Image (tube, helix red, strand yellow):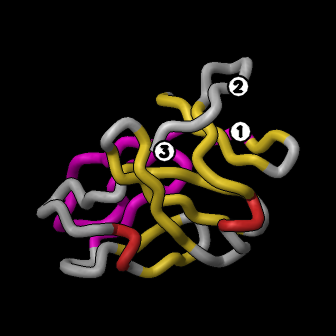
Amino acid sequence: MSGTVNERGGIRVARLADVRPGEMTTVEVEGVRVLLANVGGTVRALRDRCSHEEAPLSEGELEGETVVCPWHFSSFCLRTGEALEAPAADPVEAFEVHVVDGEVFLSRQ
C-alpha cells in the first residue's frame, strides 16, 4: 500500500482508528506485509513474518509489548523486533511509527 509521505519521510498506512488498543492488523508497505499492533494507545510495527519459519505473526497473540508466533510460539519485542523466545533466534524488522492527526505513518528504523 503506498500512501502519503509525511515530513519525516514516513508513509501513511492507516488511520489510528483502524488499529484499536489491544488489537493487531496488517498493511502492505512497498511490497512488505507489516503487522500493526496497538499497545495501550501506542502503535508498534513489525514485518509480519516470524524469523524462524516465516509464520504470519499477525495470526499470533498480542501479549503486552510482545507478539507470539502462532506456529512455534517464539515471541518478539514489538518495539525492537528482537526475538525473545526460542526457537526463533533472529529479530524481525521493526518500523518506526509516527501518528500525526490520527494518521499512522511508518518508516524504516
- Name the front one of labels 3 and 1: 1
**CB under 8 Å between discs 3 and 1:** no
- Which dot marks residue 6? 2
Amino acid, disc 3: Thr
The percent coordinates of residue 25 (x first, y second) are 52, 68
Going from N to C along the chain, the mark reached first, 1 or 2, is 2
Instruction: From the viewer's perspective, tell me whether residue 2 is left or right of residue 49.
Output: right
**CB under 8 Å between discs 1 and 2:** yes
Amino acid, disc 2: Asn
Measure the alpha-carbon separation of dots 3 and 2: 22 Å
Name the residue beneath numbered marker 3. Answer: 80
The magenta-colored residue range is 74-98
Relative to residue 66, is residue 107 depicted above or below?
Answer: above
Front residue of 60/19: it is 19
Tell me the element at label 1: strand
Q: Residue at x 68, y 67 (%)?
A: 18
Main secondary structure along the magenta-highlighted residues: loop
- Residue 24: name its quadrant: bottom right
Amino acid, disc 1: His
Q: Residue at x 55, y 49 (%)?
A: 79
Tell me the element at label 2: loop
Name the residue beneath numbered marker 1. Answer: 98
Relative to residue 104, is residue 58 depicted above or below?
Answer: below
